[in-house]
Amino acid sequence: MMAQNKRLIGIVFAIALLLLVPLVAMQFTNEVKWTILDFIVAGFLLLTTGLAFEFVLRKVKKTKNRILICLVILAVFLLTWLELAVGIF
């Protein structure tokens, strides 16, 4: 149980670090112009993806099934991110 809680803390910490990248970039260049809404949406997408991975790791026992489900979650995340970023559809 304790390892699972550490994994959740790691997920939240990793998301915070990922969101720091555009925040820092905005301080050094005008090429990155995120609004607070951009940070909220990115945080939501990253958090739901991370929590979905955590759910799969806790509930799915077979390694092959875990990998397949996590790949599908990752594909949905990437397609959503791309659609929001550049409108591929």
Image (tube, rainbow, N blue to C red):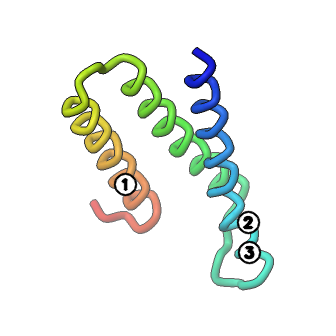
- Which residue is label 1 attached to? 78
| Amino acid type indicated by mark 2 | Leu
Estimate the x, y position of residue 13 in percent, counting from the top left.
68, 44
Label 1–label 2 contact, CB within 8 A = no
Total labels drawn: 3
Q: Secondary structure at mark 1?
A: helix
8 on left or right of 87: right
Q: Earlier in the sequence, mark 1 or mark 3?
A: 3
Label 3–label 2 contact, CB within 8 A = yes
Per the model, the C-alpha gap separating discs 3 and 2 is 5 Å
What residue sits 22% from the left and 38% below the top? 68
| Amino acid type indicated by mark 1 | Leu
- Which residue is label 2 attached to? 23
The residue carrying pointer 1 sits among few (fewer than 14), some (14 to 19) or many (20 or more) residues within 10 Å by Cα, namely few
What residue sits 77% from the left and 83% below the top? 28
What residue sits 63% from the left and 30% below the top? 6
Q: Quarter of the image containing the N terminus?
A: top right
| Residue 35, picture quadrant | bottom right
Q: Earlier in the sequence, mark 1 or mark 2?
A: 2
Q: Nearer the viewer, residue 88 or 7?
A: 7
- Which residue is label 3 attached to? 26
Estimate the x, y position of residue 34 in percent, counting from the top left.
67, 65
